[in-house]
Image (cartoon, coloured by chain):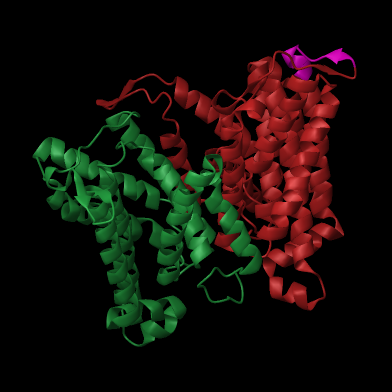
Amino acid sequence: MTQRIGPVALILAVVGLVLPWVVYPVVAIDLACFALFAVSLDLLFGFVGLLSFGQALFWGGGGYLAAIMLARTHVDASIAIVVGIVYAIVLAAIVGAIAVRRAGIYFAMITLGVAQIQYFSAFQLTDITGGENGLNLHSRGTLFGFALENDRLYYYVALVLIALAVWFAVRLVRSPFGGVLSAMRENETRTVALGYRVNRYKLAVFTIAGGLAGLAGALYAIGNHLAGLEMVDWHTSGAVVMMTVLGGIGTIFGPIVGAGLFESLEYFVSKMRAFDLFGVHVPAIGEETNMVMGFIFALCVLLFRRGIVGEILARVGKRREPH
Amino acid sequence: MLRVVNFAHGAMYMLGAFATYYGAQLFHVPFFAALIIAPLAVGAFGILLETTLLRRLYRLDPIYNLLLTFALVLVIEDVMRLLAGPLGSPYSTPDALGGVSNLGFTLYPTYKLFVIVVSVVVCVAAWWIVERTPVGARIRAATENPVLVRALGIDVRRLVTATFGVGVALAALAGVLAAPTTNVQPSMGDGVIIYTFAIVVIGGLGSIVGSIVAGFALGLLQTIGAVVFPPISTTLIFIVMVIVIVFRPAGLFGKPETSG
C-alpha cells in the first residue's frame, strides 16, 4: 500500500509547496483547509462507512471559536487554534455519543440536525458570533510572536499543520485501529462477534474526524479573517461530501484531490462568461455554480462512485472496491 | 417507506409552489385547479427522475441515493434561480379563502383553516391507503421483502415508481398550499427539508402515523416555543430530535431494526 500511495503523496506535496505561487495565496489557503476538511470526512465515510451530513458543525465550530478567541481576547494564534480544535473535539464526542447509535441514513440525518442547532445558534447569538455578518478579524494575530499577515507565510504555516494532520490520518487508518475500522465497515456483525465494541470505535473516529475538521475550520477562518454563517451552513456539509466522493472515498489522498478540483472548478465556473456552444447560447452562470457542481456530482455518483483517485488506483493496482 | 431518502423533496415542494405561480401568471390557472394540476405535473417529473436516475442505485447502499438527490437539489434550485431570480414572487391568497372565519371562540384566517383541513384530509388518506387497502399492503410488503413480493407476481419496480411519484406529488401539494403564505422563491425548499428530516427521524422512518403525529406535535411545540422563548423556536425541533434518539433510537413510532 505504501508504494502505491507514495507517488500520490509526493505529487500532492509538490503541488502544496508551489501552490501559493501559482494561484492567489488566499485561494491556496482555502484549498489546503478544504483538503483537510475533506480528509476528516473521509475518515468517517470512507473508512467506517458513516456518512456525516453535518461535518460543518466541527468546521464551523472550530472556525468560530478560533475567530472569537482572536477577536475578543487577542491571544496567540496557536491558542486560538487549539481552542477551536478542543471545542470541535468536545462537540464531536457529545454528538458522536448520540449519533453512533444509528447508522446509514439516520446517522446522516442526526448529524445534519445537530449541525442545524449550531447554525441557528450562530445566527441568533449575534453578540458573540456577529450573526448574519459573521465575525470579522482585523488581523490574524501572531503565532509565537511572529505576525501572520503575509498570506504566503500564513499558507505555509497552515500547510505544515495540515500536512501533519493528514499524516496522522494516514497513520491512523493503517494502524491496527484502522484495521478494526475497515472490519466494521465490511461486516459489522462479525466485528461485534469478534469482541470489538464497535460503537466505541465509531465514537473514537467521529471525535478524531471532528478534531481534524475543527483544525481545518480554525485555519480557514483565521486565513480569511472571517468566521461567517456559511461555515456552519448545511450546504458546506454537503460540499465537503461532494469533494470527498468526487476525489474517492476511503483513499485519504483522494479527498484532497477532490477538494482542490471542486474549489478550482467552482472558481472557474463562477468566472465563466456567457458563450455560444454550437449555436446554443450558454449564459454566464455567475453565483449559480451549484448547478454545475451538482450535475458533476450526480454523474460521479451514477457513473464512477470510486471517485477520481479511487478509479485511478483501481486501474493501476488491484485495489478492492470501497463497498 | 421506500428506504429512499429524498433530499430533493424540498425541491419538489418548491417546484409545486412555482408551478402554481407560473400557472397563474402564464395560463391563468386558478388556485383550486393548481391544487390538482401542480402535484400531477411535479409528480410526473418525480417519476421521470425515479425511472431514469434513482432506479440505477437501488441495489447499492441507500446513502448513494441520498447523495444523488442532494446533487439534484443543487441543480434544480440553481436552475430555478436562473429562471426566476433569487428573490421570489408573491402569490396572493385566492379571494374565496381570504379574510377570517369566526370559529365561535376565536377568529382565524380562513386560508390557514383551509390548509389545516386539506392537510388533515391528505394525511388521513395517506395513512388509510398505506395501512388499510390492498395497494398499501403491497407497498408495505415490497418494503419488507421485495424479492418475495416479486415472486408473487407483483411488479415491484412499478409499485416503487408509483409510490415515489405520489410522494413527490404530496410534496408539491404542500408547495401549492404554501404558495400564498410565503414568498415563492427557489430556496424555499431548503429549510423545509431539514425540518422534514427531523420530523421523520422523530416519528420513525417508514411510519406514516409517526410522521404525522410528530409533524403536528412539533408544529404546536414550535408555536408554543415561539411564544414562550422566541430564540429557541428554530432549534427546538432538533433538540427534540436529539432527545428522542437518545431514549428511543428507532423513533417514537418506529420498530427497532436489526441494522441500519
Q: Quadrant of the C terminus of chain A?
A: bottom right
| Span highlighted in magenta in the image | A145-154
Looking at this view, is B229 or B255 the one in front? B229
Query: x and y percent of residue A197 in the render?
Result: 80, 69
Mark count: 0
Please state if A289 lies on the left or on the right of A90 as rendered. Answer: left
Residue displayed at 85% across by 55% down:
A175
| The furthest residue to the right | A144
Is A152 in the magenta? yes
Residue A15 shows in this picture? no
Query: x and y percent of residue A293 in the render?
Result: 47, 37
Looking at this view, is A239 or B135 the one in front? B135
Q: Chain letter for green? A: B
Query: x and y percent of residue A128 in the render?
Result: 67, 28
Please state if B114 lies on the left or on the right of A134 as rendered. Answer: left
Please state if B205 lies on the left or on the right of A56 as rendered. Answer: left
| The furthest residue to the bottom | B152
Which quadrant would residue A260 be assigned to in this image? Answer: top right
Residue displayed at 49% across by 66% down:
B203
| The furthest residue to the front | B105
Please state if A16 lies on the left or on the right of B107 as rendered. Answer: right
Identify the hue of chain A.
Answer: red
Looking at this view, is B114 or A70 the one in front? B114
Is A318 in the magenta? no
| The furthest residue to the left | B28
Residue A219 shows in this picture? yes
Query: x and y percent of residue B41 in the render?
Result: 21, 52
Which quadrant would residue A106 be assigned to in this image? Answer: bottom right
Residue displayed at 60% across by 37% down:
A232
